[in-house]
Image: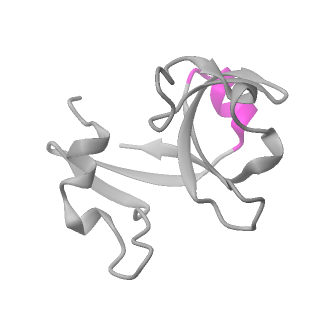
Amino acid sequence: RGVTPQTINGIPDNFASYYPAWLKHTISADGSTSSRVSASIDSELSAGRPVVVGISYDGGPLADHFLVLISGSNGDYQMNDPYTPNGHDIPLASHYSVGSIREIYKVVF
């Protein structure tokens, strides 16, 4: 799985054609295709499956940044955040609140 943010960004069809060009729910990169479907954070994490969450930076109703929750429960989550320097396996609460989560997805290959 050599998929990185750069390989995803390198395929224009992964994004909506309007501005802002949101990432589509089904994307392809490096020969892999995945889809996001709604999920429950704690049940997915307890089963060992990471969860993609969309957060709102400004408190508005729409997600404007996405990250991956990798473990935890009851609002105490560890995440991988592609935007945060050294953002691998760090607490969600170190940069965001649980209340900023607007969208919750699991990834299906």
User: The C terminus appears in which quarter of the rendering?
Assistant: top left
The residue range painted magenta reads 40-48
Q: Percent x, y for residue 56?
A: 68, 56
Q: Residue at x 26, y 53 (%)?
A: 9
Residue 30 vs residue 72: left or right? Answer: left
* Colour mapping: one colour
Residue visible at 25% across and 36% down in the picture: 3
Q: Position of residue 101 (x, y in %)?
A: 72, 49
The residue closer to the viewer here, 97 or 52, is: 97
Please tell me whether the stretch drawn in magenta is mainly helix, strand or loop: helix
Q: Is residue 30 above or below residue 102?
A: above
Judge from the rendering whether residue 92 lies leftward or rightward of residue 97; answer left or right.
left
Judge by depth and name the residue closer to the eye, 15 or 45. 15
The tally of labels here is 0
Q: Residue at x 41, y 53 (%)?
A: 35
Is 25 situated above or below 101? below
Q: Is residue 62 above or below residue 43?
A: below
**Image spot of residue 4 (x, y percent):** 28, 36
| Residue 15 in the image, given as x and y percentages of width and height | 33, 67
| Residue 44 lies within the magenta run | yes
